[in-house]
Amino acid sequence: QVQLVESGGGSVQTGGSLRLSCTVSGYTYSTYCMGWFRQAPGKQREGVATIDSDGDTAYRDSVKGRFTISRDSAKNILYLQMNSLKPEDTAMYYCAAEPSVTNAHYGLGTHGRNFAYWGQGTQVTVSS
């Protein structure tokens, strides 16, 4: 059974940092494109960062230089390090995986559409 579980969300002030984790079980996730997506109330879901099976990464423009996606393949954990947080980063953050996506940039642009497996989400709130 494929399972993704996020953790690490919370509330911080502008300029603060958080590190999100996604623990994967049920499959070897290194063969999948993995990604972080977020959705704020009343907003459409958007891609934040993705990493493919080759380790290549892609980021939405608004988080470049501030967020870093990485993976620990041995432990089956996906991370999102978020620095210099802004109020506009406030959203529910979801971890997702898709075995058919081989390119991180493509995966990011789907905004999660066609991603097969999802975690339950973790809330990130940034106050000004």
Image: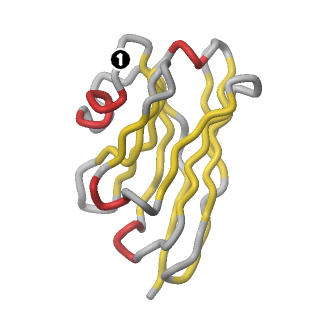
Is residue 41 positioned above or below 29 on the image? Answer: below
Is 29 on the left or on the right of 104, as rendered? Answer: right
Is 98 on the left or on the right of 19, as rendered? Answer: left
Is residue 19 positioned above or below 85 on the image? Answer: above
The amino acid on which the numbered mark 1 sits, given as a three-letter code, is: Val
Determine the residue positioned at 47% across, 72% down.
Answer: 85
Is 97 on the left or on the right of 103, as rendered? Answer: right
Which of the two residues, 20 or 60, is positioned nearer the viewer here? 60
Badge 1 element: loop
Position of the N terminus by quadrant: top right
Can you tell which quarter of the image residue 22 is in? top right
Q: Position of residue 47 (x, y in %)?
A: 33, 44
Q: Position of residue 24 (x, y in %)?
A: 65, 27
Q: Position of residue 7 (x, y in %)?
A: 66, 49
Is 48 on the left or on the right of 5, as rendered? Answer: left
Which of the two residues, 82 or 95, is positioned nearer the viewer here? 82
Instruction: Tell me the colour scheme of the image.
Output: secondary structure
Q: Residues within 10 Å of mark 1 (few under 14, many from 20)?
A: some
Position of the C terminus by quadrant: bottom left
Determine the residue positioned at 35% across, 53% down.
Answer: 39
Please, which residue is most extreme toward the right here? 75
Q: Position of residue 28 (x, y in %)?
A: 64, 13
Determine the residue positioned at 58% across, 18% down.
Answer: 30
Determine the residue positioned at 44% across, 30% down.
Answer: 56
Please, which residue is most extreme toward the bottom here? 128
Can you tell which quarter of the image residue 100 is in? top left
Can you tell which quarter of the image residue 72 is in? top right
Is residue 43 positioned above or below 111 on the image? Answer: below
Q: Which residue is mark 1?
A: 101
- Count of numbered marks: 1
